[in-house]
Amino acid sequence: MRRPAISTTITVLAAVSLVACSDSGSPSTDGAVNFNLATRSAAPAVASTMALADGTNTLVIDRIQLVLREIELRRSASASACGGSEHGDACEKLEVGPVLLDLPLGGAGGAARSFGVTVAQGTYDEVEFEIHAASDDDASDAAFVQAHPEFARVSVKVSGSYNGTAFVYTSDLNAEQEIGLDPPLTIAGSTPTELTLFVDIDRWFRDGAGTLVDPGSANAGAVNENLVRANIRSSLRAFEDEDHDGSDD
């Protein structure tokens, strides 16, 4: 399948070389992986926004930004989770972060490249990361907050309109995500393997009946805050996507 043309802005805090989560110091054979983002499968060219409807309400999303950190792949042979010294060489770091990502909304859909790194060759069955609200009083987050002061204690930001009225939704959601890769991701040789994180935006601002809710009603302390936070956490999938069409290969 011919790869779709993607027009999007991906903001990466820093390009980092991958290091294995290993304290053994032993050498490893390098492969490569590209980390991509998608919010819908490839389709004919559409506007640079995402429009959602439920028959009564219309939600137009102009921009979505998401802050992640500690993006890692876990080896199939390991029963340990990533994120601590106890996992030994079970994991490979893709990006330490925090990293600010603009999710692709328009163009022809499909997956947009975020960054690429070298990794140890092997088979991986899980991708793990944190949705992270950086703190301006946390030393490890200081450089990120200095570069993006509007994201101090903000991990998700969405702008657009609901029934014609402009809104800005923000969240300080902090959540560890562990997403299984089925089939597992095999990294071998010098040709990069394509890993796509798919974010199902259509689910974010809907209730259990599928009715759209006003994103303004999901800001801190508002009635739909917990609904949308839970929807965001459950909207993420990951899979190999060699043709960049935003669908599981």
Image (tube, grey):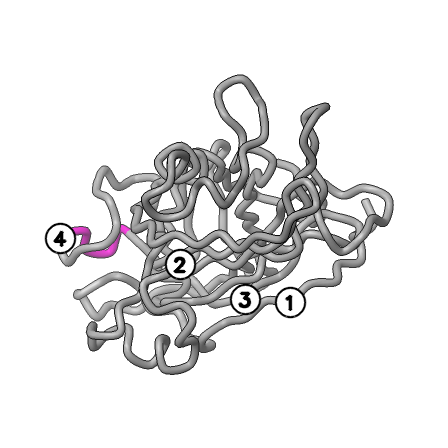
How packed is label 1: few (under 14 Cα within 10 Å), some, or many (20 or more)? some
Q: Is residue 65 above or below residue 117?
A: above
Give left or right: position of 202 versus 121: right
Looking at the image, which residue sits at the far front? Answer: 165
- Between 4 and 25, which is closer to the camera in this rendering? 4
The three-letter code of the residue at mark 3 reads Phe
- The quarter of the rendered structure image containing the N terminus is top right
Residue matched to label 4? 86
* Label whose residue precedes the other's in the sequence (3 or 1): 1
Q: Nearer the viewer, mark 4 or mark 3?
A: 3
Q: Residues within 10 Å of mark 2 (few under 14, many from 20)?
A: many
Residue situated in front as seen by the camera: 116 or 156: 156
x, y percentage for residue 232? 45, 40
The answer to which quarter of the image holds residue 210 is top right
Q: What percent of the width, then of the height, locates residue 93? A: 35, 61
Q: Which residue is mark 2?
A: 68
Establish if 33 lies above or below 219.
below
